[in-house]
């Protein structure tokens, strides 16, 4: 079996951590039990470009139990847990191509290895796998890394067509990936149906909000060991992730300031009790900054120069473009590593700014990503969407689709049941009332 990981000797440690995560993933466990009997994915090859964490390991085992042959690569150079990668290779015979801290060329060479699996189904977190696949199929050689270009050019046109033709469909985990896929659909280049797992209620309402909220604050605290209480904590972006981070930072006693571009979100932040202001003003007062916008350069070089001496900047959005890092380099006279995940930049004006985790998702760089209890629902959506695509792909167009509502609701039902929470059901009288327009007072 081909694989590329840091150290196979870490497998025992990884296995224990996967077992620990699995204890909080009852919904995915119930899917795995059914998959083991029914084998809905028998004979299918799945290539998955995901953060290689304990929760992803539980998902990969579920897909394998369903009969699929799975190959994994990382969806971010800093998010791999090397012991988990080792355990998947050594204990589950699942090929993994991912090493924490890999450089960009290696990152894409790992995506290439996953592509060589000739997937029938793809899974993405940020759309790097699907976009690479499309760049090859569309002969867009300027847009791919050297390794992918060389391999793609070594294929005949027929082989390149086969590569894309054998994909029945894919899934996308995160907001940024869905935005990329929607623009592929709009430009008429999307070659197969993709399910936006991110848009399922049982995904973004919980994973983006509570998962990113808790783990981002966890990452900032682990990286810095600084006290949040009494500090001013600036959150850029009040979407699902930003709401979660703001709520958790407030819970730690920070004074939270929100920066937004959308008037509705900004209004919501005001009514949730936060101060709202442009980043140009917030830059001057923040002790901590965290971007979660899915956008480029939410904090720019002029803002860095306006910051207080000692300001701490971080990002938890998908790509490391939310902080203008080239701009930061331009206005810096020197930099040094202070401690793990903390880079000190001395600016032209003598102030120092501390960059966490090289501007990559801080919850995965310095902490362990989302807690497994919340990934239980996100990844149940992934597993069930794989099953759905395998059955329904012929009836789907080359578009981005939502997770079917029946799957979303079933996951919520299973999660509640696993928590021992019971809810009411409508009485016949209520059902009639809610479905009629004739009844008034
Ligand atoms: P969202 O679309 O719900 O929220 C993004 C918000 O940022 C929007 O309200 C938008 O108006 C605002 N925004 C855009 N440009 C801005 C700017 N220049 N300044 C201030 N605000 C701006 O998206 P969501 O789900 O909150 O995701 C945000 C990012 O986090 C995405 O890149 C997503 O892929 C990523 N993500 C990261 C996770 C992690 O583990 N760290 C987990 C889930 C998502």
Image (cartoon, helix red, strand yellow):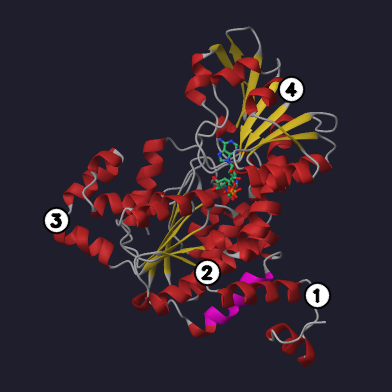
Decide if residue 29 is in sight here. Answer: no
Density class for disc 3 (Cα within 10 Å; few <14, some 14-19, many ≥20) is few
194 sits left or right of 197 in the view: left
- Label 3, label 4: how far apart the Cα atoms are: 58 Å
User: Splitting the image into four quadrants, where does ligand 1 fall?
Assistant: top right
- Placement of the N terminus among the 4 image quadrants: bottom left
Mark sitting earlier along the chain (4/2): 4
Q: Which of the pair 435/188 is nearer the observer?
A: 435
Residue linked to disc 2: 403
Density class for disc 4 (Cα within 10 Å; few <14, some 14-19, many ≥20) is some
Q: Mark 1 near ligand 1 (CB under 8 Å)?
A: no
Q: Which of the pair 172/1 is nearer the observer?
A: 172
- Label 2, label 1: how far apart the Cα atoms are: 25 Å
Pinpoint residue 311: horizontal percent, then vertical percent.
Answer: 69, 22
Decide: marks 1, 3 in contact (CB < 8 A)? Answer: no
Pinpoint residue 301: horizontal percent, then vertical percent.
Answer: 54, 20
Write the start and end of the magenta stretch as one range: 26-36
- Label 3, label 2: how far apart the Cα atoms are: 35 Å
Q: Residue at x 38, y 49 (%)?
A: 111
The answer to whether 287 is drawn above or below residue 264 in the figure is above
Mark sitting earlier along the chain (3/4): 3
Residue linked to disc 1: 420
Residue linked to disc 3: 156
């Amino acid at each position: 079996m081909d694989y590329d990981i840091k150290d196979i000797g870490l497998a025992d440690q990884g296995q224990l951590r996967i077992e620990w995560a699995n204890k909080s993933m009852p919904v995915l466990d119930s899917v795995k039990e059914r998959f083991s009997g029914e084998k809905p994915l028998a004979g299918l090859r799945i290539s998955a470009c995901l953060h290689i964490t304990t929760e992803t390991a539980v998902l990969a085992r579920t897909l394998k139990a369903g009969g699929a042959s799975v190959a994994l690569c990382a969806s971010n150079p800093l998010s791999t847990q090397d012991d988990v990668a080792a355990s998947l290779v050594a204990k589950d015979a699942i090929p993994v191509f991912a090493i924490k801290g890999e450089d960009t060329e290696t990152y894409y060479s790992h995506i290439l290895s996953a592509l060589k699996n000739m997937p029938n189904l793809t899974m993405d977190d940020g759309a790097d796998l699907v976009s690479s696949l499309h760049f090859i199929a569309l002969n867009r050689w300027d847009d791919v890394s050297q390794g992918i270009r060389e391999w793609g050019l070594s294929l005949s046109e027929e082989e390149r067509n086969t590569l894309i033709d054998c994909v029945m469909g894919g899934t996308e985990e995160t907001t940024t990936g869905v935005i990329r896929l929607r623009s592929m659909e709009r430009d008429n280049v999307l070659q197969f149906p993709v399910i936006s797992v991110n848009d399922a209620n049982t995904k973004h309402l919980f994973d983006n909000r509570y998962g990113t909220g808790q783990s981002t604050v966890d990452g900032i605290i682990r990286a810095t060991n600084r006290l949040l209480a009494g500090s001013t904590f600036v959150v850029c972006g009040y979407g699902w992730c930003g709401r979660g981070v703001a709520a958790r930072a407030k819970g730690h006693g920070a004074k939270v300031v929100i920066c937004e571009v959308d008037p509705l979100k900004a209004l919501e932040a005001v009514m949730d009790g936060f101060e709202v202001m442009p980043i140009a003003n917030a830059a001057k007062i923040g002790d901590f900054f965290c971007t979660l916008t899915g956008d480029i350069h939410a904090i720019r070089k002029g803002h860095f120069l306006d910051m207080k001496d000692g300001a701490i900047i971080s990002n938890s959005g998908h790509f490391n473009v939310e902080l203008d890092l080239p701009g930061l380099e331009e206005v810096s006279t020197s930099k040094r590593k202070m401690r793990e995940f903390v880079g000190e930049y001395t600016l032209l004006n003598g102030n120092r700014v501390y960059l966490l985790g090289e501007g990559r998702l801080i919850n995965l760089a310095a902490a362990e990503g989302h807690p497994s209890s919340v990934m239980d629902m996100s990844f149940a959506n992934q597993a069930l969407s794989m099953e759905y695509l395998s059955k329904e792909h012929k009836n789907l167009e080359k578009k981005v689709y939502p997770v079917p509502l029946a799957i979303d609701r079933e996951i919520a039902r299973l999660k509640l049941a696993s928590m021992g929470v019971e809810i009411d059901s409508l009485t016949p009288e209520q059902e009639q009332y809610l479905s009629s327009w004739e009844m008034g007072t």
